[in-house]
Image (cartoon, helix red, strand yellow):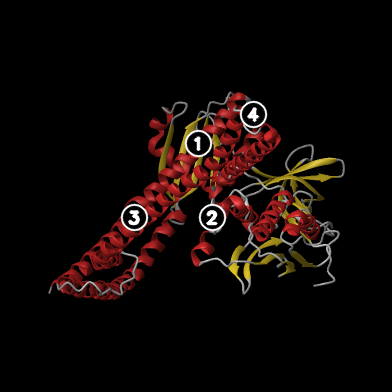
Amino acid sequence: MKKRSVTTKLFAATSIFVLVLLGSILIGQKLFFERYYQSSKIQDLTTAVEGFSYTFAQQPADRNTAARYIGTIMNEYDASAAILDKRFQNLRLEPYYIDIKVRDKTVTIRITSDGMQSGDIPQKLNAGDIITVEGFFIDEQNQVMKPVTITKSAALAAEPNSGHSQVTGVITELLLPDQRSYNPYYQNMLVEQALREWMAQEMDSLSQLGEGQAAHMKWSDPWSGVNYMLVLERLRSGNEDMSYMFVMTSLQPVSEAVSLLTSYFIYVVPSVIMILLLLSFVFSRIVSKPLVALSQLAARMANLDFTVRTPIRSQDEFGELSRSLNILSSNLDDTLRELTNANTKLQEDMQEKARLERLRKELIANISHELKTPLGIVKGFAEGLQDNVAYDKRDRYVAHILSEVDKMNALIMDMLELSRYEAKAVRLNRSNYLIDEQVRKAVDSFDVQRSSKQLIIEFTSEEHVRVTADARRMEQVIVNLLSNAIRYAFEHSTIRIALNRISTEQYSFQIDNNGPQLSEEQLLRVWEQFYRGERSRDRKSGGTGLGLAICRHILELHGSTYGVENTKDGVSFYFTVARSIGEVGDNNVHE
């Protein structure tokens, strides 16, 4: 029942709202639209008259100038206008004209309202057109002509009508009715009649008009029945002949528009009602379907079943409610799981914290270990020198002291460099260079260490392997990996270095030795600072324990892939480096 009640209320409210809206529009259109149009027309015409008055008050105008200005107003406002003297007599200015150039003089063709029809003048006349006019001159200088016929032609007729003259010339200037409704010449002829009837009704009140004041009246043409709006205003012109301006405009367009709108709504209202009934039915279905689904979801949630989800995905209040209930169900269902996960995460965090604490203690122990031993050796030799013990071994003691100082200095420098990498304070200086030559030079620099362990170093590579990298940093990586391989290699074994192209953009560097393999933990931690596989061999094998950690930072800055793995006979380190494309010296023979 509730669902039907909601549907019924929705149907009734929608119907009433639409009917009230349609009624308001019809009533407003009937009562106010025509009044608004009339008020707007009066305001526009009053503004035009005031503009005329102000213009000619600044510079008094003659009749011709005033006539042309009136013609402009008539075209712009679709109105008929006249200038009246102080006795309200029409000065009968003719605003429409055509000036044509006839040989050495200009002839003005006056387009009067008397006897003229819209079809008497050719359409779309423009300056520069050639026309032929038949009529009669109305001045002594034969410069102003009242036309009888106007044709757009350059040829004179064989013989003009009796008493008429005929001229042909080029149009230099013209002002004709433009954008006027109905027959503008007929409307202009009505000025005298409308003015006469208005004067007969309200002569006393019109004579009291002052400057800046306007009178208006609605007048109906007795012959056509068309309604007109009349506006009369006193002029501020300095010309005594021009005292008032009279303007009239047709109200027929708005009357026709209101009538058409009324007829239109009569046909539209039944269709709107039918659409309303159909939409109300559709709305009732749309509203009831999601409510049923939401009711079912609520019932299952009341039974603590939080796995159900509603299929509603609409972007409205029902969709929002559905998403909220789904979120609520999901949150309740996930709460216990989240508590379990939180407990697991807490344990993992505690383990990570313990691991970090272990690393911190190990780092402190490593630093202490690395510095304590050389400091103890230096102190022992220094005390011997101080007590003049074994005077004949003085030089040997000094050499030991300097050796240990060099080791401590190397450790401190490596620690400083590592701290710069960890602080992201190192910037690479990339260039294109031959890495195969760099590897060969690094191998040659280890001749002494290689000879002492009687090692063989095999290097396989293409010729002229050009890469893009920081040459100094990359040399540091190669030297560290080669030193590490030699340090832990068995005596009389072979170290193999390979530089191979693995794609069009990368080379792979790999170095293998024959030596002890690494455990799983060592494979994971070998890149950490101060980590060595054999703690007992630290002092004997040399090194600071920071070399591989520095290598890791350098390779990560280059965007290289790197790693370490056990081989059949020992350990293999590898990394990638970007190939230099299209540079001079790039060898494409081995691709």
Report the mark closest to the observer, 2 or 1. 2
Question: Where does residue 328 sit, x and y in percent of width and height?
Answer: 25, 64
Question: Where does residue 317 sit, x and y in percent of width and height?
Answer: 28, 63
Taking the image as shown, residue 324 lies to the left or right of residue 472, namely left
Residue in view at x 79 percent, y 50 percent: 128
Instruction: Kindly indicate whether the residue at mark 4 contacts the one at mark 3 (C-beta within 8 angstroms).
Output: no
Mark 2 secondary-structure assignment: helix
Q: CA distance from mark 2 to mark 4?
A: 120 Å
Residue that badge 4 annotates: 61
Q: Which residue is more in the foreground, 510 or 59?
A: 510
Mark 1 secondary-structure assignment: helix
Q: Is residue 19 above or below residue 275?
A: above
Q: CA distance from mark 2 to mark 3?
A: 31 Å
Q: CA distance from mark 3 to mark 1?
A: 87 Å
Q: Earlier in the sequence, mark 3 or mark 1?
A: 1
Question: Where does residue 188 sit, x and y in percent of width and height?
Answer: 55, 47
Residue that badge 1 annotates: 47
Instruction: Kindly indicate whether the residue at mark 1 contacts the one at mark 4 (C-beta within 8 angstroms).
Output: no
Q: Earlier in the sequence, mark 2 or mark 1?
A: 1
Residue type of the residue flagged with mark 3 = Met
Find residue 536 and name its label: 2
Q: Is residue 223 visible?
A: no
Residue type of the residue flagged with mark 1 = Thr
Report the mark closest to the observer, 3 or 1. 3
